[in-house]
Image (cartoon, coloured by chain):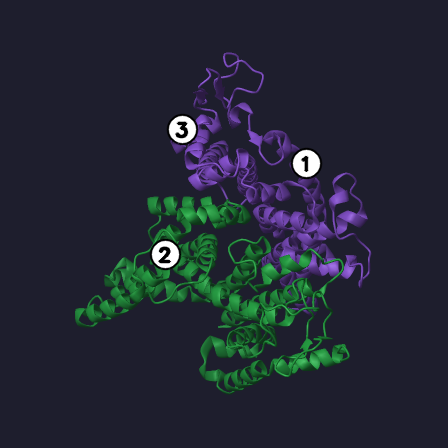
Amino acid sequence: MEPLSWLEILTRIFIQFMPVWVAMVVLFTLSVVYKRRLGLYGKLFDSTIGMIGFSLVMFWVFTGIFGAFDLIITHDPLSQVSGMKNKVPGTPITGADSETYPYYLFGGDNLARDVFSRMVKGAWVVVQIAPLATLFAFMVGITLGLPAGYYGGKLDTFLSFLANLILAFPVILLFYLLVTPEIVDTGIPSYMAMVLFVFPIIFVAVLLNSRYRTQPSVRTPLLIGVLGVMGWLYLSLISQPGTALKILPDAIDLFNLQGGILVVFVSVVFVNSPTVFRIVRGLAMDIKTRDYVAAAQTRGERPWYIMLWEILPNARGPLIVDFCLRIGYTTILLGTLGFFGLGLPPESPDWGTTINDGRRLLQIYLHPAIVPAVALLSMVLGLNLLADGLREESLRD
Amino acid sequence: MGLFILRRLVIMILTGLCLTFLVFSLTNLYPNLEKLAKTQGNFRMSDEEVTSYLDRNGYLQPMFVKYGEWLGVVPSYRHENADGTIQGRCIRPGMAPEDSPEFCGVLQGNWGFSTVFKDDVGSIISTRLSLTGKLMFWVMVVMVPSALILGVLAGMREGSKTDRGLSTIAITTTATPEYVSGVILIAVFASSTVGLKWFKGTATSAMDSANFENFALPVITIALYGMGYIARMTRASMAEVMTAQYIRTARLKGVSFPNIVMKHALRNALIAPFTVIMLQFPWLLNGVVIVETLFNYKGFGWTLVQAAGNNDIELLLGVSVVSVFVVLITQLISDIGYVYLNPRISVS
C-alpha cells in the first residue's frame, strides 16, 4: 500500500474524530439556542475569544472521554507493531489483517507505537486529573483563605507564612523531593493526601451547617447523609494497598487509583493550593469591608455563614476565571512531571511523558514529540482564552 | 524604611531556615540513606552493613542534630573505628583528627562532597551557577524589553485592534510551557530533516563559547514563557494609567499622544511590572531546569536534575539552598523596590 498524502491523513483524522464533532455540534447548538437562560455560561457565547477557547477545551474533553471508551483511537496505545518504529505519518502497516486499522496516522514512535492513539489517550489522563486536582486545590485554598482574610491577625500571619513557604520553593525541586520512589515508600505522599483531601469534607460540612444551622430537622439528616458518602469516598481514595495507609478492607474499598496517580495528584494539589489561598484571602479582605457584610454582621449571622454565603458568592467572578487559568497551569504541571519522568509509569501515554520520549530523537524524527506538544499547547491555550472570555463577560455586568 | 527592611530580612532568614530544614529532612529520610549506603558501598550490602555504614558516618543521629551539623552550629560527629582511627565529617583525608576544625557546615563554607561529580559541592555550584547566570542574563536582555514594549503598545489604546492582536500573542506565549515551545522551536529552526536549520538544537557548546547559533534557542524558549505574563501585567497597568485624570488633563492641554505615553504614562505604568519581573524568578528557575535538560546545557538546573535523579544528597541540599535564597532575595528586592518606586505606599 502507498503511504498517505497529507490531505488523506487529515481526512482520515477528521473521520476518526467523528464522535467528537457530533458531540460538539450538539453541545454548541443547545447552548446557543438556550444561551439567554444559562447565565454566565450563556454569555460566553457572545464573545468570540471565549467561544474559540471553549471549543478548544471541549474538543479535548470529548476526545478524552471518547478515547477512554476506545472510540477514536486506531490502535492500542501500548501495543508495538513491528516495522513501524519511527515511521513518518501516514505509513501503512505491512501485512495488516482486516481487523486492524491499516495506517499509523501520525506515524510511529521510537517503540513502534501509534502516535495518534497515544495522543488521544493522553487527553484522557489530563481530563481525568487536571480539573479534579484544581477543584481540590480550590477547596483547600478557600477553606483556609476565607478565615485568614476575614479574621486577619495571628491566624492570617501564620497561614500566610506557611503559604509563602511553599511558594518560595521551586516547583521542580518539590516534585523531585516528593515523587521519587524512596519518598513514596516512606508514605509521606499518602499522609499528605490524608490531610489535603479532608478539606473538601470540611468545606461541605461547614457550608451546609452554616446554612441550615437554624433548622436542625433538615440539617442533621442532610449532614449525616452527605458526610457519610463523602467520608466513604475519602477513605476509599486514601487507602491504597501496598502503601503506608491501608485503612479499609478490600470489600468496602470502592476504588484504587493505579500506579502513581495519587502521588501526582497530591503533589499538584499541594503546589496549587497556596496560590489559591492568597487569591481567596485577598478577595475576602476586600469584600469584608462591604456594606452587605456589615448588614449580615448586624443581623447577627455567624462568621462562617458570612464567609461562605455572603463573601464567597460575591468573589465568584475572579475565582471562576482563576479556576480556568489554573486548570491550564495544572495541565502544564502534569506535563512537567511527565517530562521529568516523575510519578506516572514510563509507558503512560500522557503528553509530558510522550514529549520526553520523543525529544531524544527530535533532530531526526519530529512527529513523536511535536504531536503531543501541539496537543498540550492547544488545550492550555483554549483554557486561557476561555478564562479571558469569562473575565470580559463577567466584568460587563 | 530601615525597620521595614530589617523585619523583612528576619522573616526571610526564618523562611530560609524552615525550607532548608524541610529539604534536609526529606533528603535524609531512611530510604534515601539506605540507597546512598548501597551506592557508596556495594549493592549487595546486608541490612546490618547498611546500618553500620550509616552509623560510622553519623547518619543515624536525630534529624535536628544532623541539620545543626550540616548548618555548622553543632560540633560535627566523630566516630572511632575498631582500629582506633577517628573519622568524621570535618576530617579530610590526610588530616589528623586533632587538627581538623570542630564545626564544618554551610556557615563555615563547607558544603559537603558530591557523590556523583566527585567534587566539592561549593565549587560545582559556583561553576554551574555562573553558566546559568550567563543564560539568565541573555534571557533578561531579551525578555524584559520585549515584554514591556508589547505590554505598553497593547495597553495604550485599550480595546483596539493592536491590543487584541498583541494580547492574543501574550496569551499564546503564557500557554506554551518551555518543554512545548522548546520542542516546536527545535523542530522549526534546528531539525536536520525538515525545517530552517538556522540554529543548533543543543547548547552544550555554548558553555564555553556562546554565540547566536547555539544560544538563541534556549534563550528564546525561556524568554517566551515569561514574556507573556509580564506583557499582560504591563498592559493592565498601562490601561489603568491611561484612564487616569492627569492623562486626560494632558490630552486636553493638547500634548501629543506619543508624548503622553512616553513622558506621563510610562513611569507610573512600570511600577507593577517591576514587582512582577522580580517575582518571575522562581518561575524562571523552573524554566531553566527544563530548558537546560532539553538543550543539554550543563548549568544549575541540569545539576539539580542530576543530583535529584542520582540521590546525591549533599549536592541536592546545596542546590536547594541556593535556589531558595535566590527566590527569597528577589522577593525582598521586589518588596523594597515597590515601596521605593511607589510614593503612595508608606511603610511606617
Name the residue rendered at 51%, 63% in the picture: A327
Name the residue rendered at 39%, 63% in the picture: A256
Q: Nearer the viewer, residue A2 or B249?
A: A2
Which labelled disc corresponds to residue A19?
A: none
Q: Label 1, label 3: how many angstroms apart (C-alpha)?
A: 33 Å
- Chain rendered purple: B
Q: Are marks 1 and 2 on the same chain?
A: no
Q: Label 1, label 2: how many angstroms apart (C-alpha)?
A: 43 Å
Q: Is residue B344 left or right of residue A52?
A: left
Drawing shade for chain A: green
Dot 3: few (<14), some (14–19), or many (≥20) neighbours within 10 Å?
some
Q: Residue type at mark 2: give it.
A: Leu
Residue that badge 1 annotates: B130
Q: Is residue B135 left or right of residue A246?
A: right
Q: Label 3, label 2: how many angstroms apart (C-alpha)?
A: 38 Å
Q: Nearer the viewer, residue B187 or A2?
A: A2
Residue that badge 2 annotates: A146
Q: Is residue A146 visible?
A: yes
Q: Which circle, 1 or 2, is nearer the viewer?
A: 1
Q: Residue type at mark 3: give it.
A: Val
Q: Nearer the viewer, residue A108 or A179?
A: A108
Q: Which circle, 1 or 3, is nearer the viewer?
A: 3
Q: Is residue A293 visible?
A: no
Image location (x, y in percent) of residue A324: 51, 66
Image location (x, y in percent) of residue A147: 34, 54
Q: Earlier in the sequence, mark 1 or mark 3?
A: 3
Location of residue B159 (image quadrant) = bottom right
Which labelled disc corresponds to residue B65?
A: 3
